[in-house]
Image: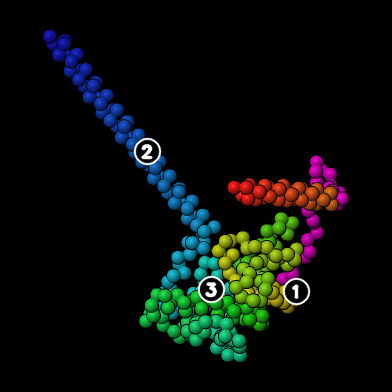
Amino acid sequence: MDKKKHTGFVSLISSNLLFIYFKKKEERRKKKKKIHKEKKIQKNKIKKMSNRNNYNDSESDSEEATRDDDGMKWISWFCGLKGNEFFCEVDEEYIKDDFNLTGLRSIVPNYEYAIDLILDNENLDDLSEEQREIIESAADFLYGLIHARFILTHRGMSAMAEKFRNVDFGRCPRVLCNGANVLPIGQTDQPRINTVKIFCPKCEDIYYPRLRRHSNIDGAYFGTTFAHLLLQTCPELLPPKPTKTYVPRIYGFKIHPSARIRQEERAKQIREQNRRKLSKQMNKKKKKRTRN
């Protein structure tokens, strides 16, 4: 009888120990799962933040909404916004000189309000949100047009040359330029026609900016003259011409120029065949419609 009690007691203890063991094991498993889940969430957050900073700047630039009332000038605030890295700070003395702004009054809507906002003479607190947006948009437009004129002056070119040395405008995407510094340039001096491009002084060609947040800037804010005038004024900024050019090869052999001519002729024939097929299909559809 005592032996049976003893064996029963032992089995009870062993079952309790097993229960505790499996319970702790389950707790450890849940804890590991929770830690793994938290790490995954954190990793996704970091990935989203990095993607937002690199590619989705046009959507993520919520910081442009507010300006601290700590004495920061509108011009400094505007140039410090993400996406406005191509702009330099225009001197207030230049803006206050009416001669420098000749002809802009007729181009910019709400000119008086815009110039007062740029020079921190205008308080928008009493205006509605819609009115504030209109005046802020006019101020952005006016500042861009003033900027295009200012960077052609000695002080403006000095400020832009410093940004060029600091690679604020980026590097040439062409491989054989070996990351040469670039300058912002417009394809026209007329506003609201083309966006800003980057000009490489090494290969002397223009490209789209690398970051999407720069692709919405008006090219007229930099104009067609600035980049070339800066390099003429500061020849030390001009890089040496590229010594290498890309040579197409197939299995290590250069492609003869005559091959390009044959390719173009063949492509022309294919386009003509496709055009004829399309016209035949259109004629068949028209005939079916007329029958019906």
The structure residue drawn at horizontal position 45% and vertical position 75%, both measured from the top left corner, is 133
Q: Main secondary structure of the magenta part?
A: loop
Question: Looking at the image, which residue is at 19% across and 13% down?
Answer: 7
Q: Are marks 1 and 2 in contact (CB under 8 Å)?
A: no
The x, y position of residue 67, in whole percent, is: 43, 74
Q: Earlier in the sequence, mark 3 or mark 2?
A: 2
| Nearer to us in this view, 31 or 98 | 98
The x, y position of residue 97, in whole percent, is: 58, 90
| In front: label 3 or label 2 | 3
Gap between marks 3 and 1, in whole Å? 27 Å
Q: Amino acid at mark 1?
A: Pro
Q: Is residue 239 magenta?
A: yes
Q: Which mark is residue 79?
A: 3
- Label 3 neighbourhood size at 10 Å, few (<14), some (14-19), many (20+)? some
Mark 1 burial class by Cα count in 10 Å: few <14, some 14-19, many 20+: few
Q: Earlier in the sequence, mark 3 or mark 1?
A: 3
Q: Which mark is residue 284?
A: none
**SS for dot 2:** helix
Write the residue at 15% across / 14% down.
Answer: 5
- On the image, the x and y values in percent for residue 268 come to 79, 51
Helix, strand or loop at label 3? It is helix
Residue 165 visible somewhere in the drawing: no
Q: Secondary structure at mark 1?
A: helix
Question: Disc 3 vs disc 1: which is toward the camera?
Answer: 3
For the N terminus, give its image quadrant.
Answer: top left
